[in-house]
Image (cartoon, grey):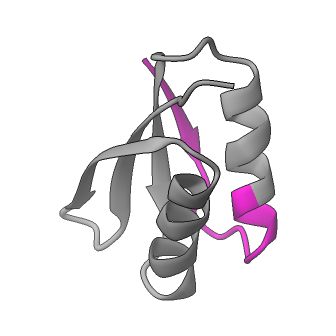
Amino acid sequence: MATIDLRGVSCPTNFVKAKLALEELEPGDRLELLLDDGEAVKNVPRSLKGDGHKLLALQETAEGHYLLTVEKGEE
């Protein structure tokens, strides 16, 4: 499973980068995203879910960032 570090990337660029990374995967494949607290952790999961992807987990790391695990939805 690939991990994309989107810490320090502002909205909506972080969503665009996540979406582009998911486009490279097959339906059912999983991707981990590292996100900042605040807007990113609120907007990116909501937008990805709205695009038909499945949110599997959202965990806060010891450093105060968030690790989002997403499964690519059907195209």
Asked if residue 56 is positioned above or below residue 29 in the image, the reply reads below
In screen coordinates, is 67 left or right of 73? left
The residue lying toward the viewer, choosing from 54 and 70, is 54
Residue shown at the point (28%, 67%) measured from the top left: 63
**Apparent side of residue 51 relative to residue 45 in the rendered image (left or right):** right
The stretch of residues the image draws in magenta is 1-15
Expressed as whole percent of the image width and height from the top left, the position of residue 13 reads 81, 65
* Percent x, y of residue 27: 56, 16
Q: Residue furthest bottom?
A: 38
Q: Quadrant of the N terminus?
A: top left
Q: Quadrant of the C terminus?
A: top right
> Farthest residue in the top direction?
26
Q: Residue at x 41, y 41 (%)?
A: 54
Q: Is residue 47 left or right of residue 13?
A: left
Residue 17 x/y as whole percent: 77, 48
Residue 44: quarter of image: bottom right
Residue drawn where x is 58% and y is 54% of the image: 48
Q: Would residue 7 be counted in the magenta stretch?
A: yes
Front residue of this view, candidates 7 and 72: 72
In reply to whether residue 6 is colored magenta, the answer given is yes
The quarter holding residue 28 reads top left
Residue 24 picture location, percent across and down: 74, 19
